[in-house]
Image: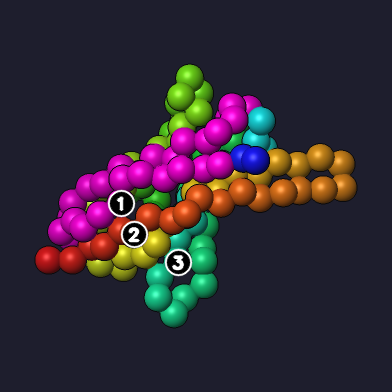
Amino acid sequence: QVQLVETGGGLVQPGGSLRLSCTASISIPSFNAMGWYRQAPGKQRELVASITTGGSNYADSVKGRFTISKDGAKNTVHLQMNSLKREDTAVYYCNADRRWAGGRVDYWGQGTQVTVSS
């Protein structure tokens, strides 16, 4: 059973920073990609950032403010969030996927709340 455990959410003022971490129960190279999604109240879950062996990808709304990185030795992916805005408030979910010919499986963390408010 693959598990993803997230840490690092919380309350921060606009303009502040937070770092989210996601630790997997298996090694990162076992996955095709890892990433972070978020879901705000009344909205659909959206991709924030993802990382593969080929590089990283960001939603336009977070480019230049968020950075995704990985620590292979600790099976951990980080999301550094700077210059946070009120609209970044959401539950953030870690995601990882494994793929093979004709199939794919996604794994999800439990979610961590990020609230940007003064």
From mark 1 to mark 2, how far is it between C-alphas?
5 Å
From mark 3 to mark 2, how far is it between C-alphas?
10 Å
Left-right relation of 51 to 17? right
Q: In the displayed image of the protein, which residue is found farthest to the right?
A: 102
Q: Earlier in the sequence, mark 3 or mark 2?
A: 3
Marker disc for residue 113 = 2
Residue 54 visible to the viewer? no
- The structure residue drawn at horizontal position 65% and vertical position 36%, both measured from the top left corner, is 31
Q: In the displayed image of the protein, which residue is found farthest to the left?
A: 118
Q: Nearer the viewer, residue 61 or 107?
A: 107
Q: Secondary structure at mark 3?
A: strand
Q: Amino acid at mark 1?
A: Gly
The spot of residue 110 in percent (x, y) is: 47, 54
Q: Amino acid at mark 3?
A: Gln
Marker disc for residue 9 = 1
Q: Secondary structure at mark 2?
A: strand
How many labels were placed on the picture?
Answer: 3
Q: Quadrant of the C terminus?
A: bottom left
Q: Earlier in the sequence, mark 1 or mark 2?
A: 1
Q: Are marks 1 and 3 in contact (CB under 8 Å)?
A: no
Marker disc for residue 99 = none
The spot of residue 84 in percent (x, y) is: 25, 56
Q: Nearer the viewer, mark 3 or mark 2?
A: 2
The spot of residue 100 in percent (x, y) is: 81, 40
From mark 1 to mark 3, how far is it between C-alphas?
14 Å
Q: Nearer the viewer, mark 1 or mark 3?
A: 1
- The structure residue drawn at horizontal position 75% and vertical position 42%, both measured from the top left corner, is 99
Q: Nearer the viewer, residue 79 or 73?
A: 73
- The structure residue drawn at horizontal position 26% and vertical position 46%, both measured from the top left corner, is 18
The boundaries of the magenta stretch are 3-29
